[in-house]
Amino acid sequence: MADLTRQWRMSQSQLFSSGSEVGNLVVTSGVLSDSWDVNSALYTEINNTPSSNFPIRFKIDKRPNCNIIAFVTWPPCTKEHLQAVGAADFVSSSALKDTLPLFEFLCSKTNPCFSINKLAVECFKSLRGVLPFLRSEILNYKPLIITGHGLGGSVASLFTLWLLSEINLSNTKRPLCVTFGSPLIGDEDLREAILQYSAWNSCFLHVVSALDPLPRVFTSTRNPPSIESASRTNEYKPFGTFMLCSELGFTCFEEPEFILEFLKSTYSEVSPQFLDYKPIVEQLKLKVICQDTRLDVSTSEPLRAGITVQVLATGLGQNINMIDALITKTWKSTIHKAQVFDPSKELNKMKINMAQLEWYKKTSKDSGIGYYDSYKNESFTSDQDVKKFKKTLTLYWEELVDEVEKKPQKEGASFRTRWLFAGTNYRRMIEPLDIAAFYRDGRRRDYLKGRPKHYKLLEEWLNDDKRPASIPNINSKKKNVEASLTEDSCFWAHVEEARISCKWLIQNSESSIVEGQHKSKLNEFEGYVLGLLSNYAVSPEIFLPKSSFMGWWKEYEEIIDKGIMGTFYSLQLTDLMKTRRYSHYATGSL
């Protein structure tokens, strides 16, 4: 049991692994029998306790190798309860902001709203007062199984979602939620919201018998949500893995369309009021032990054979149309997964490109010009190679930033933290090259107005990062200033705008409002530069003889000497530049 969660998720990562093999793992691990035993024990404990309105009851079962939390309703939920007027209605996440804002973390820019079954939400809401207690009972080092039956399974799913947002997954095992005969709880938007968290979908296992009516009620056209439903699609969609059981066997599926087809195809108005899953779990164990092979599959194609076995195991028979549709969707899924952007796989290539740019930066510095001005002036043939490296890196980081921005708040925050160092280095190295290209012909102005979005977001994420380790102390910066990158990746845009102001003042001698604006900008630039220098936040390369910054200083010195600035300039910066004290900056002794 201790390794169950790890084994379970490893099996889910195999694209073409058989659903029957996944089912065998779950059955033989004992997780099904253990989970149902706690549900059954909870029913027994409350059997003689009169109650109404389906209050949710829970039980915590602490075992040597795991903890199990079970949820049930009493009296047990039946098909008639779910078919009552309004039982199938949705409530939107936006409507829950004031009354139950526990699922806001699932909202994202691309998926801002989703809908949950109203009845399930009301049941979960009744537990709000005990959520801190339940959270406190969870031990980081022990596997946790959260389980429930019927509507209690819906509550178990919602509790698991809430818990995933509360626990620190870096030092805590992800819980496994196992439901028995649970009705569907959300729409397509909820499913998409969960899928945005890379590993969360595998935290849910829903066991459904071919004889159980409860998981099918919300899929029936006879029991739709009201027209005024809060859902965009007004249809229930499954998420997680479904273990579909019949007298012929069992199999596991994640494909929502197949799961819905199974639930609809096996819907029956004549069904038991309460289905005990204990004999079903025992029968599944027996089938695994006896290796039941009564399923007849006549095909030499491995993929078709595997899918046919899974369809037959659900009790639907040789449904050719369904088998063909599943094969098509499997191939589409394969192609989609191959095309999904995975920054980790490309990271080594990006490191190579960054290393090439580091070398370019070094060779430019040795030439006394600096890599910013070298690229701007297109001084070397190697500048063409730099364009290729820069393009590759930019495409990578644009896509990565776009992916992170789409993620829900918590997942996005975790992702941003993981990539923050690499993203900051990229921004500080590459954005100056974009600025150089922008001002290259001398006719464009104000780069900051149209600054690329991914640079702005990378800078925002760095500013939002409050970890002490992300803020180096001044002594450390002094020691490493020689090899550092300028912290403000827009530094050169400020230099270029300051040079534009200098040229205007040199070429125009008449007093005007525009003259005052340019003088004010230059004064602001002086303060900006002094702030960077005092914090050792700018690269010493700005003082190279052929740099644009030194070009600005020559122009500005001319303006000062001609008295154009009057007394409206910084004596501190002027003294530092004229006395060449800036030559000590690279050694940290300014």
Image: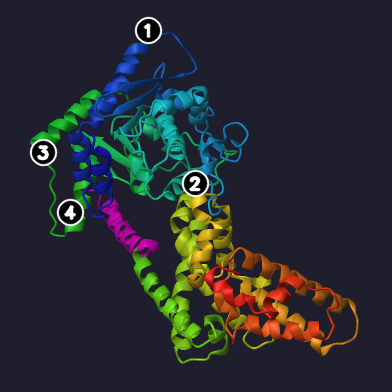
N-terminal-most mark, 4 or 1: 1
Can you identify the residue that label 2 sits on?
410
Q: Nearer the viewer, mark 3 or mark 2?
A: 2
N-terminal-most mark, 3 or 4: 3
- Distance between mark 1 and mark 2 Cα atoms: 43 Å
- Distance between mark 3 and mark 1 Cα atoms: 40 Å
N-terminal-most mark, 1 or 2: 1
Pick out the residue farthest to the left: 290
Q: Is residue 255 left or right of residue 537?
A: left
In this rendering, the answer to whether 321 lies above or below 382 is: above
Q: Nearer the viewer, mark 4 or mark 2?
A: 2
| Image coordinates for residue 115, horizontal then vertical, percent | 52, 40
Q: Is residue 21 left or right of residue 110?
A: left
Label 1 CA crowd tier, 10 Å (few <14, some 14–19, many 20+):
few
Q: Nearer the viewer, residue 129 or 138?
A: 138
Can you identify the residue that label 3 sits on?
292
